[in-house]
Structures are given as C-alpha cells and as structure tokens.
Image (cartoon, grey):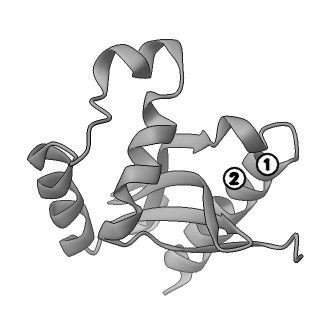
Amino acid sequence: MNNEITFRRAAQADLPAIVHMLADDELGSRRERLEDPLPEAYLRAFDEIDADKNHELIVAELNGAVVGTLHLTFLPSISFQGGLRSQVESVRVDSRHRGRGIGARMMEYAIARAGNAART
C-alpha cells in the first residue's frame, strides 16, 4: 500500500466525498445537505467553479481515495505590480485521516500552486 498523497483537480464524481468532508463538523452538519443523490445546487456550483480559470477545487488522494479538499481562488490584483493573489477556502481532511499531516501537505500544495500561478 502506497502512503503518498497526490493532488488533482476535483471531478464531479468526487462531490459526494467533498460534501461529506464539508458536513463532517458541527457547523457543516447544520449547513450542508449530504443526501443521495446530492442536491442539484452542489452540481451547479461545481460546474461554475470548474469552468472558471480563476478557481480550482482540489482533492487530495491517498491510495485512490479522496481524503482532503480545498478551494483555491486566484485574484487579479493591482498590488504586487498587477500580480495575482491567491485565497484558500474550504480546507477539509476526512475525519478518518486527521492527525497524519495531510492538512499541512495540502497547505504546502496550495502555497506552491499559488506561487506557480503568480509566475505564469
């Protein structure tokens, strides 16, 4: 069994795992709707995010299973001489995999990805 975390853009098929992680805390359990099938609003939001070049919904995988997610947004800015800024939102690690450094790896990925985007 490989214990390497890999990162990729989320696919629509990842939505149940993503919504599960979003709903897996006190606040999320009150505002998210983890149903089968998922409410249409999640599919519309995914399509909108996926179509926008300034948004990346990322998943972290371990042995082929989605164990984390984050939403990275790229913001055009006047500051930094017209540079691109980045914002990270909705960072979650599956509760069964917390305490293994996955969240730290996800933030390292986000920082590296933001740095790469700023240079292009």
Which is more toward the observer, 98 or 37? 37
Q: Image height check: is 91 above or below 43?
A: above
Query: Horizontal placement of 84 versus 62: left or right?
Result: left
Q: Which mark is residue 117?
A: none
Q: Secondary structure at mark 1?
A: helix
- Which residue is tagged 2? 107
Q: Is residue 16 left or right of residue 119?
A: left
Mark 1 highlights which residue?
104
- In the shown orientation, is residue 99 left or right of residue 39? right
* Point 17% across, 66% down: residue: 47
Q: Tell me: 23 left or right of 59.
A: left
Q: Residue at x 21, y 49 (%)?
A: 37
Q: Nearer the viewer, residue 15 or 110?
A: 15
- Amino acid type assigned to the residue bearing label 1 in the image: Ala
Task: Answer whether labels 1 and 2 touch (C-beta < 8 Å).
Answer: yes
Spatial CA distance of label 1 from label 2 is 5 Å
Q: Secondary structure at mark 2?
A: helix
Amino acid tagged 2: Met
Which of the 4 image quarters holds residue 19? top left
Q: Where is residue 22 drawn, in percent x and y?
A: 45, 35
Rendered position, 98 above or below 9: above
Where residue 76 sits in the image (x, y, percent)?
Answer: 32, 62
Residue 73 at x, y percent in the picture: 39, 57
